[in-house]
Amino acid sequence: MRKSLGWAELALALLAVIGAVACWNAGVRTTEFPAVPDVSPAYSGTFYSGSWIALAALAAVVAGLLMVDGVRRVVSRGAPPTG
């Protein structure tokens, strides 16, 4: 039971990493602006959406916690310490 729960946590951690990457990509938008003759050269602007970036950071933290606990459950032997 312990090891299967650990593997499930590792699978959820992988899904959280995929979700973090998807949120990050949704939060960054680059726009190309063409050159205007005799006024300005061509340039690109990048817009960062704070809510998407924050959600990506939260998903990365959750993935890290799940990964640490999942590895602990898979690698450890015997009953958990009762402190």
Image: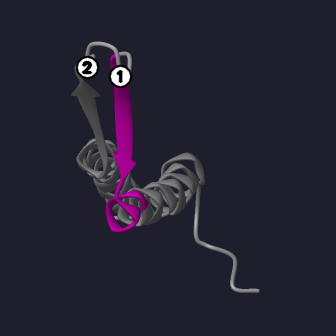
Q: CA distance from mark 2 to mark 1?
A: 5 Å
Q: Amino acid at mark 2?
A: Val
Task: Determine whether the residue tagged by mark 2 lies in a helix, strand or loop.
Answer: loop
In front here: 19 or 74?
A: 19
Q: Position of residue 48 (x, y in %)?
A: 39, 51
- Residue at 23% in and 48% down: 26
Q: Which residues are magenta?
A: 42-53
Q: How packed is label 1: few (under 14 Cα within 10 Å), some, or many (20 or more)? A: few
Q: Quadrant of residue 81?
A: bottom right
Q: Position of residue 28 (x, y in %)?
A: 33, 44
Q: Which mark is residue 39?
A: 1
Q: Position of residue 14 (x, y in %)?
A: 32, 44
Task: Determine whether the residue tagged by mark 1 lies in a helix, strand or loop.
Answer: loop
Residue 71 on the magenta span: no
Q: How packed is label 2: few (under 14 Cα within 10 Å), some, or many (20 or more)? A: few
Image quarter in which the N terminus is found = bottom left
In front here: 22 or 32?
A: 32
Residue at the extreme bottom: 83
Is label 2 in contact with label 1 (beta carbons under 8 Å)? yes
Q: How many marks?
A: 2
The residue pinned by badge 2 equals 36
